[in-house]
Image (tube, rainbow, N blue to C red):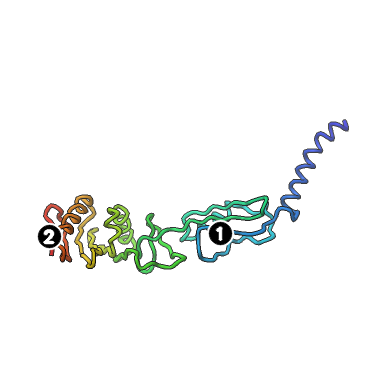
């Protein structure tokens, strides 16, 4: 009977002991908090000396991911060093509309590092039209996207672009977002011609019959 009691009690005592050590003793506590992936200072919501067992990584990660500028957050605890590590992946801005940044997923946010002057400027009458411009931007040829400075959303989903080309800017009447690969090839071919070295306007709305000025 005594042996049976010991057999049952021992696991319970071990469980209670480990619970105390992890949750209440000063052995496993937060020694430091490191945030990786951002330059700005943010409140992690974790205090030095706090019990490691009482820290919930998913809750902390979710708290960060609720911030508009955070794309993903991962939280880990080191039980030996006591360091809590928070890895944050910021959203990357690709365009600006009315002072707000857009990322490649069409999410709007305020970048922690501020707005870069190199971002594409979107000119549109409303947010829905601005989202159409972002979708268009994402599907655009990478070389063209790098030289793009302004997207103007016109009526019926038509786009006008302003691109940096060498030492000049070129205004491109793109039209609606169809035959984009053909329009890209036509634009590159037009710009590559020596006689078009001073061209500042190109109409690609009818790519089989482009116009240059």
101 left or right, relative to 49: left
Q: Nearer the viewer, residue 22 or 1?
A: 22
Q: Which mark is residue 35?
A: 1
Residue sitting at x 23%, y 52%: 180
Residue 135, how many percent across, how many down? 32, 55
Quadrant in which the N terminus is drawn = top right
Residue projecting furthest to the right: 2
Quadrant in which the C terminus is drawn = bottom left
Q: Secondary structure at mark 2?
A: strand
118 left or right, relative to 16: left
* Circle 2 crowding by C-alpha within 10 Å: few under 14, some 14–19, many from 20: some
Is 53 located above or below residue 6 in the figure?
A: below
Say whether marks 2 and 1 touch (CB < 8 Å): no
Q: Nearer the viewer, residue 190 or 134?
A: 190
Residue 162, how many percent across, how many down? 24, 64
Instruction: Tell me which label, 2 or 1, sits earlier in the chain.
Output: 1
Disc 2 or disc 1, which is closer to the eye?
1
Residue sitting at x 14%, y 62%: 196
Q: Which residue is mark 2?
A: 211
* Circle 1 crowding by C-alpha within 10 Å: few under 14, some 14–19, many from 20: some
């Amino acid at each position: 009977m005594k042996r049976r009691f010991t057999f049952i009690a021992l696991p319970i005592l071990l469980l209670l002991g480990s619970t105390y050590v992890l949750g209440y003793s000063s052995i496993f506590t937060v020694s430091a908090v490191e945030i990786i992936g951002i330059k700005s200072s943010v409140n992690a919501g974790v205090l030095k000396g706090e019990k490691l067992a009482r820290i919930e990584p998913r809750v902390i990660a979710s708290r960060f991911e609720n911030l508009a500028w955070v794309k993903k957050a991962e939280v880990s605890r080191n039980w030996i060093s006591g360091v809590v590590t928070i890895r944050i992946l910021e959203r990357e801005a690709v365009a600006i509309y009315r002072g707000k940044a857009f990322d490649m997923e069409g999410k709007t946010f305020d970048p922690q590092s501020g707005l870069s002057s190199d971002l594409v400027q979107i000119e549109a009458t409303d947010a829905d039209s601005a989202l159409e411009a972002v979708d268009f931007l994402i599907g655009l040829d990478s070389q063209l996207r790098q030289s793009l400075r302004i997207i103007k959303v016109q009526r019926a989903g038509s786009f006008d672009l302003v691109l940096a080309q060498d030492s000049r800017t070129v205004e491109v009447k793109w039209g609606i977002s169809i035959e984009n690969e053909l329009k890209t090839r036509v634009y590159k071919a037009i710009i590559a011609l020596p006689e078009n070295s001073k061209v500042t306007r190109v109409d690609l709305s009818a790519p089989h019959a482009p116009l240059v000025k």
